[in-house]
Image: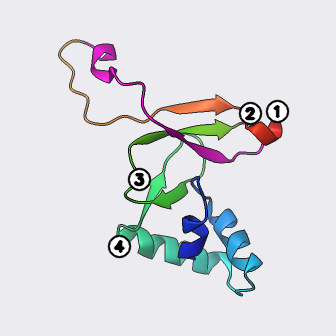
């Protein structure tokens, strides 16, 4: 199952993990995928990608800071390298930014 994440350049939903594993003729079910994802999160090998109003996706821990693009047609989520920076300049006076996540929404290359 780790190979599904290693072979992907974007966060995966549990069903996408299952589809990838089944391509390699490994016979498992979706419940096994969820159990393994939970275990890999506890081991800090995976982290959840929480998109408002969407089911969680998961990606390998340890990546450089990045953001995500959500395709409104196919629902896939893609990594966006980099960060616009200057987040503190956008923050109201007296507030302290502890973390941030930026999501861009649109159509991926395949869905345009």
Range shown magenta:
72-92
Q: Is the C-beta separation of discs 4 and 1 under 8 Å? A: no
Q: Quadrant of the C terminus?
A: top right
Residue 62 versus residue 85 in the image, above or below = below
Q: On the rendered structure, is 90 left or right of 20?
A: left
2 or 4: tag closer to the N-terminus: 4
22 horizontally vs 36: left or right: right
Q: Is residue 10 left or right of residue 23?
A: left
Quadrant including the N terminus: bottom right
Q: Are marks 2 and 1 in contact (CB under 8 Å)?
A: yes
- Distance from disc 1 to disc 3, alpha carbons, whole Å, reads 28 Å
Which residue corresponds to the image point at 59% horizontal and 80% vertical from the top-left? Answer: 32
Residue under numbered circle 1: 112
Q: Earlier in the sequence, mark 1 or mark 3?
A: 3
* Residue picked out by circle 3: 63
Q: Which residue is mark 2?
A: 107
Residue lying farthest to the top in this orientation: 93
């Amino acid at each position: 199952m780790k190979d599904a994440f290693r072979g992907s350049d974007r966060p995966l939903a549990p069903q996408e993990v299952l589809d990838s594993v089944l391509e390699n003729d490994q016979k498992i079910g979706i419940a096994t995928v969820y159990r393994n994802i939970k275990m890999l999160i506890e081991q800090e090998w995976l982290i959840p990608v929480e998109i408002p109003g969407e089911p969680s996706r998961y990606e390998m821990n340890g990546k450089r800071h990045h953001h995500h693009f959500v395709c409104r047609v196919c629902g896939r989520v893609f990594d966006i390298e980099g960060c616009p920076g200057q987040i503190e300049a956008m923050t109201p006076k007296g507030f302290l930014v502890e973390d941030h996540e930026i999501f861009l929404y649109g159509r991926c290359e395949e869905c345009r």
